[in-house]
Amino acid sequence: MYKKIWLLALALVCLSNFGAFAQQTTIWLVRHAEKQAAIASMMSASDPDLSELGIKRAADLAGVLKGNKISAIYSTNYKRTLATVAPLAAGLKLTPATYDPREANTLATKLAQENKGKEMLVVGHSNTLIPLAKALQATVPFETLTDDDYDMLFRIVIADNGKAKLTISHYGDKHHTTEIPAAFLQTTK
């Protein structure tokens, strides 16, 4: 009788700890914050700094994500993307790794392999975030972001089985024209 109870207890302990081995990977995707209007030279037109609104939005992003366990930050090599993550990176004492925004599949593979079970942030552009989300196997409710979509924060959670779930929230001051379908709307962190 004691042997049966002991075996049952052992089985229950093993089953209760099974979830501890499961690892989910969380990838936050965000577009760079508002940029300055291109008025000066050709160089500033292709790589503008953040505007005052953009600087505030970068601080808002840091405030929203500071409580998360972000272990890596990825950014394109543009002033506006690097400035968007600067406050968060400084607060977390992380140096953003740069990536080529044209290589969504390569980045998706890297994120999944090198950061399994971790949490990270990727900053990109209106025309690169949706292809990256799709490369991560997430179902996305729209094909593109508009030039006015600056306040969306995408959260992709990838389970051990590779299944990705996307939720989207807004952060900072309202600045978007694309509406998030209710099924994708994240109301809490």
Image (cartoon, helix red, strand yellow):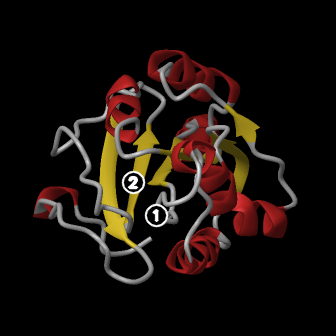
Rendered-image quadrant of the N terminus: top right
Q: Residue 154 carries which label?
A: 2
* Distance in Å between CA atoms under marks 2 and 1: 25 Å
Up-down: is 101 above or below 34? above
Amino acid type, residue under disc 2 in the picture:
Phe
Q: Is residue 104 left or right of residue 63?
A: left
Residue 65 is at least partly visible in this image: yes
- Out of 16 and 78, give the one closest to the viewer: 78
Amino acid type, residue under disc 1 in the picture:
Ala
Extreme residue toward the right, this view: 93
**Which residue is depicted at the point 74% across and 62% down?**
86
**Which residue is depicted at the point 31% across and 55% down?**
167
Q: Which residue in the protein does label 1 denote?
A: 37
- Out of 98 and 72, give the one closest to the viewer: 98
Residue 71, given in percent of the width and then of the height, sits at 74, 49
**Which residue is depicted at the point 29% across and 55% down?**
147
